[in-house]
Amino acid sequence: MSGKPKLAVFKFASCDGCQLTVLDMEDELLALAGAVEVANFLEASREVIAGPYDLGLVEGSITTGHDLERLTQARASCATLVAIGACATAGGIQALRNFVNVADYVKLVYARPDYITTLAQSTPPSAHVKIDYELRGCPISKEQLLGVLGDLLAGRAPRLPGHAVCVECKLAGVPCLTVARGIPCLGPVTQTGCGALCPRYARGCYGCFGPQDTANTASLISILKGLGASDGEIVRAFRGYNAMAPEFLKAGGGQ
Amino acid sequence: MIAMPAVPGVHTPARHVIRRRARETADTFTWELAPLDGPGARFAPGQFNMLYAFGAGEVPVSISGDPARPGTLIHTIRAVGRVTSVMERLEEGEQVGARGPFGRGWPVAEAQEGDLLIVAGGVGLAPLRPVVYHTLAHRNRYRNVALLYGARTPADLLFAAELDGWRAIIAVAVTVDSGGPQWRGDVGAAPRLIGKADFDPARATAFVCGPEVMMRFCAAELVNRGVAAERIHVSLERNMACGMGLCGRCQLGPVFVCKDGPVFPYPVARELLAAREL
Amino acid sequence: MAPDELARLFEYLAGEGYSLIGPTLRDGAVVFDHIRCPADLPRGVRALQTPGSCRWDHDGDSALFAHGAGADSFKRHVSPPRETVWIARRDREGALTFGQPPQQVQPAAYVGMRPCDLAALLIRDRALAQGDYRDTAYVARRAGLFIAVAECAAPAGNCFCASMGTGPGANRGYDLALTEIGNGGRRMLLIRSGSARGAAALDTLNLPFATVAQLSSARRAVETAAASMRRGPTPEGARAALNRGRESPRWRETAKRCLACGSCAMVCPTCFCHAVEDRAGLDRGRAERVKTWAPCFTREFTYIHGGAARPSVAGRYRHWITHKFAAWFDQFGVSGCVGCGRCVTWCPVGIDVVEEIAALNGAPDR
Amino acid sequence: MSRVIKVDALARVEGEGGMRLRLENGKVAEAVFNIYEPPRFFEALLRGRAASEAPDITSRICGICPIAYQLSAIAAVEGVYGIAPDRRVRALRRLIYCGEWIESHALHIYFLHAPDFLGYESALHMAKDYPDVVKRALRLKKAGNSLVRVIGGREIHPINNRVGGFYRSPARGALNALYEELKWSLDAAMDTARLAAGFEFPDFTFDHELVALRHAEEYAIAEGRIVSTGGLDTTAEEYENHFEERHDPVSTALRSVIKGRGAYLAGPFARVALNFDKLTPMARQAAAETRLTPDERNPYRGIIARAVETTLAVEEAMRLIAEYEPPHPAYHDAAPRAGTGFGATEAPRGLLWHRYDIDAKGLITYAKIVPPTAQNQYAIESDLRRFAEQNAALPDNQLGWKLEQAIRNYDPCISCATHQLTVTVERS
Ligand SMILES: Cc1cc2nc3c(=O)[nH]c(=O)nc-3n(C[C@H](O)[C@H](O)[C@H](O)COP(=O)(O)OP(=O)(O)OC[C@H]3O[C@@H](n4cnc5c(N)ncnc54)[C@H](O)[C@@H]3O)c2cc1C
Ligand code: SF4
Ligand code: SF4
Ligand code: SF4
């Protein structure tokens, strides 16, 4: 690696929020720009320096054939490829199309469905190419992104926690909402990273970081039922921003 | 207001400079570390330090140097993961941290007046080298001393240059899993060497270090040959964050590997390793 | 003294330089946190607990310390959930320096610590402050503590300290012990000292001596509490059950319910396991080591080379409860449980250690 | 001679768009501003979801203006459920919205648009010559983000907004802590306006009808009637009677028009023009200093309008914090009801309109969302066509950049253009 490592950011079907997280690192952005060469990051710069790149961030899910080609090129041009966000790690909210016939969706939204080319499924990049690291969350956490970038720049393999949000609740000193207030919460089956954000705001977790590494969804469902959740509510709870993550897919009744 | 004095070298790393770095095998290297804050600490064979690479993290690594020369810290490290891979890339002159020495090492005194079998597998020779140095220096305290060393291939042998020198003073037998055309020595697993070694089971003590399976087989073989289980000692490995029994990570049943071990009498280790997921 | 006079104790303690920590009601839950005056105490608040559920409600009474074990314990203050252990700097030449974070600890006075929690603090001392190696930050914070324990007259549903021999009365380790007697407007607090510091405090407060009737009513309050409390295992009984039950089929059953969320270990006042994280900023000039409470229920807690040492939830649950109730004896000479019931309360699915141990006892020997 | 200029991935607009221009003998034969945001089908996937989920789900349409989506959706659902947010909830909503405006405007001004005026590829390039300007930009943006974070929980897809109010009212102290930084931000916003006013602006004007919300008491942000420079004055409920989406044969995109009148423009320009009398004192001063008037029609001076609005948002945020009373209870609950609800708020880049049909169980049966970029598409395209004509003599690469800059005048948030798509079939 001569000179500064080259950074590229690729966008697929997404809301831009995860790559915006890079620009939202107001305190660290200039240090980052000093540590890497921002070679291809259209949201930040119109300058595009040709690959290969040392590090690529991939945001968004794959929903069109054209995007699949772009993804393949992105993979080929990057030494390390990091998927950022629920879209890029589990297909995102737009993966709800996977549960219906996408042609029906097209008809619902567009007057001229024949103009629309789209794949039947919204899939994470990892369904198509090798992804080196995944940053969960809808959106990702700034701290985690910074940690992963720092690790990669320092030549250390990133390592992200896989445990439940409940751990973060306890660290933050938030008395459990389910226990103390009977509020339904996906925290026990959801991976940490947000710092127990929703519980800190008296709101049950809605699973935006996807399943934790030992997600016992069956046991959680028994709690949700005990709190009066209907079958429909339970299905919707798991069919959210990470609907296609295997444990949530199963808990939501499969495809 | 209350101050919280942390002890450098125990709670915070003590600074060391990598004075020499030598490659042992494709993935293993040896550091010679010179302390920058005062003289180096004394250590017993089998003890370990928590070594720190800036920003990358800390890992437990046994001291592989000569206990009679505590001024320099010698560590032999195999690059296997996120921290050790960063360490592998550090160069001579760079600074690192070290805390320690921690743990209970090999009970060398217990073995005196009898035969001593030093059985090592792979990188397991590193924690045993201080024992070798100790016996070389105090050869007269022991009867027969044998180093039985197994590695995967000849290229994986640690301290190859030193082995011959040791042969002049103690018995050294080496075996590899697969030798290749150049290899003239033994081929096969380490336990096989036990059968060839010259020792009196009734008066022998054995120190065994290597992969867990290898230690199990060697210990079984030693017991078979009549060595009392209590006189066999093995070294266990668990993930650890503090090295001094405060973080709870290295618990194995009721023991803390860091402070109750890493060296344990075989009967204790056998019991601990028998239960799944302990 | 009358409960209102606690204000004088608060003033005295503040005057001595202590920051005050006590139980207080926040967002509907009793937590152990910084308080300023007796009004911050959860007066008349009572806990309704069953496994996996807890509601704190005003019961119309005026008791200050009838709230059971709070959601939080002293653990948060003596061993903060996240703590920078040291900071390393590297200059341009690559020279390192290691320093401690610039932190100062104000000595804290705990008013209204539960007897079970005090027992837990003494157990924690054994693990962190009495071995060959000590947690110096803990030792420093611990040394500064002033403890006014509040004996328990109103145990909550999941408490079993009487069985564990750690409550509801307190007999050592405190500077002052408070016992509430009477009810309504005639509520009184009896105070006794258990240390020189405590005696000095009492001297300054210059309170009237308790009557014999008051003393015996205090004793009765604690005895009644003990008698009304749920029965749990005895420390030795639990130890034996767990040592016997290592291969019990029960673990697999419990694992079906266990969420592996780690809540039990996180709320337990004696659990001290932690993880560390080393990290450097983008400019690579500064790195720090941060220590974080880590429950033994997470997969990463169990990593060894080659993978997780306890891949199954059954293995992790067994490790936790066995460590707590059995291995502590081997390690520190006591049980690691004080019967505060927090792990039972705060387990979202309500897995109950008392029930688990009873089941192991009932389970036929292998 | 025939030239085709394609500006493929349009840089520094959030999301991705592109434009295609065909020139024949110096005349523009075709100008297509297209967007190759892949379809995400929000309106379809909302069907069958609980109405209470709409704020969070629609926030995922756009990571740059999630508050706008959340509050438009919330307004629509509250309309059906008969919840009238109280004064405190309304104030807090306006406050978090101010945060989004500050953040989004700072991002657009400094990171997306100013580099064009100053001749840099990006703000990061600009930082080498203008370190203080870029640091100010970051700090100002952070001040806006901090408001969103403290109230909403996080900057992107905040979690605290809900139907009925907030999950938890932020503590007064947490908001007070931001006040000092806002004081600094007020100066920074004024400086931003001055900086922007000093740029060189091409001579160019448009005459589109301008559409924005208007509120009797305040500069409209989170609520108001829909008004236009053409005399329109209506409500979110009536929106569909006045506006329609056309399916243009040239492009596959759906574009909004005012029925019977055609293209229009929403956004800061429109807001300033229609609410000039409601500017706060410092914002008014900023407008005076920069000679921004309600009659301004040079799209390039949109960057000034944004700066003036940034000043306004900071000022309003300071007032709202000073007057802050935590909503209590934090939210009002209401049982689901069947009905159709409408919500319209002012996203940083313009009017954002939602409609939901909800059944008795509280499930959405129909959803329609019209984001600002869809509304502005026609206007953008026609301006670009004229602009290209004026500059047709420029070499391709320069013309390309000029066109990019022109597109950025409108701050098109491509990913929020839920309807807009890559051209897959070309007809001419
Ligand atoms: C007492 C003692 C003495 C030792 N002496 C020596 C010695 O002399 N020489 C020597 O080379 N080694 C020695 N070791 C081993 C050495 O400590 C480890 O090899 C080292 O800690 C590995 O650290 P690492 O960060 O490089 O690897 P890690 O990145 O921790 O990886 C090591 C392995 O652990 C696994 N792993 C750990 N955590 C995770 C996680 N969160 N996610 C996924 N996988 C994970 C991986 O599978 C990986 O293969 C000793 C260990 C002990 C306990
Ligand atoms: S509030 Fe949710 S995440 Fe937090 S401890 Fe309870 S169940 Fe776990
Ligand atoms: S608590 Fe759950 S839904 Fe909320 S931010 Fe965290 S992971 Fe996402
Ligand atoms: S194990 Fe449970 S009951 Fe015992 S001390 Fe810990 S939290 Fe309290």
Image: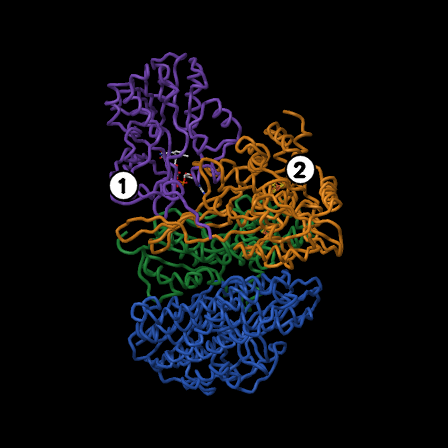
Question: What's the amino acid at mark 1?
Answer: Ile
Q: Which mark is residue B18?
A: 1
For ligand 1, the image quadrant comes to top left
Q: How many marks?
A: 2
Figure colour of chain D: blue
Q: Which residue is mark 2?
A: C354
Q: Residue B162 at what x, y percent from top left?
A: 25, 26
Q: Which shade is chain A?
A: green
Residue type indicated by callout 2: Val
Position of residue A108 relative to residue D383, above or below, is above
When asked about the image quadrant of residue B6, the answer is top left
Viewer-nearest residue: D11 or D167: D167
Q: Is residue D227 left or right of residue C351?
A: left
Please tell me whether mark 1 sits on a helix, a strand or a loop. Answer: strand
Check chain identity for marks 2 and 1: say if they share one.
no
**Does residue B134 lie above or below A100 as drawn?**
above
Residue at 34 percent across and 38 percent down: it is: B79
Residue placed most toward the observer, C188 or C257 = C188
Q: Is residue D302 above or below residue C131?
A: below
Chain letter of the orange region: C
In-front residue for pair A133/D150 = D150
Q: Position of residue D324 (x, y in %)?
A: 58, 72
- Picture colour for chain B: purple
